[in-house]
Image: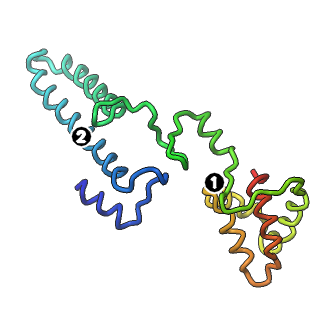
Amino acid sequence: MGSLLLGLSFLTGYKPPAENISHLLGPLGSFAGWLALILFASLTIMGLGKMSGKISANWFLSFPFGIIIIVAVMFASLWFKPSGMLMSGAGRTTMDDGRYIRSVEEYKDYLSKPVVSANVPKAPEGFDFDAAKSLFDAKCNVCHTFDSTKDAFKTKYKKTGKIDVVVKRMQAVPGSGITTEDADKIMMYLNEKFQ
């Protein structure tokens, strides 16, 4: 079943959350972790079944003890890698550089930190961001209000560093009136000042 899910993940276009994570070792590591969790839980239940007769003939004494052991094994298997090494740096959210977010404060900081797109030129010294914002409002609000697309822009393009993709797509719309120079100014504003 695990190998079926692993193969299916590649057929469905599985991508690791960061470039420095292996395409093969990522799913295999996840699969090995779940396999270890199931194996440890099964061994614990089997062991408790054998121990319950020796601990007491009364189920009410062995049952709570069994629950405590199962929960302890599950916590231990979640905190330790299959190799037995403590995995202190792992978390649920992986950043673009492959590091993990381990606290709510780090997550809020990550969401509030502006992502600078590598495909957008840096604003030159003395660049007028206020004029660029006015240009952005004038050009982009012709087709739609920015408030209606702000959430999608922030999550899909800004946080993934693909501002140039969406601006060039809007520039290509017939009648947009966005020149290449305008597009560069809008991208610089969105890249460096838009929150």
Residue ID at (24%, 57%): 3
What residue appears at the point 13 percent right and 15 percent down from the top-left corner? 55
- The picture places residue 4, in percent across and down from the top left corner, at 25, 60
Q: Residue lying at the far bottom in this picture: please name it.
A: 174
Frontmost of labels 2 and 1 is: 1
The answer to whether 102 appears left or right of 38 in the picture is right
22 vs 72, nearest the viewer: 22
- Residue 57 location, x and y as percent? 10, 17
Tell me which corner region of the image, top left, top right, bottom left or bottom right, holds residue 145.
bottom right
Task: Determine the CA span between mark 2 and mark 1.
Answer: 36 Å
Q: How is the image coloured?
A: rainbow
Q: Is residue 51 above or below residue 89?
A: above
Q: Indicate which disc residue 38 carries.
A: 2
Q: Specify the amino acid type for callout 1.
A: Lys
Amino acid type of the residue tagged 2 in the rendering: Ile
Residue at figure coordinates x 39%, y 32% from the top left: 87
Q: Position of residue 37 (x, y in %)?
A: 27, 38
State whether residue 141 is above or below residue 122: below
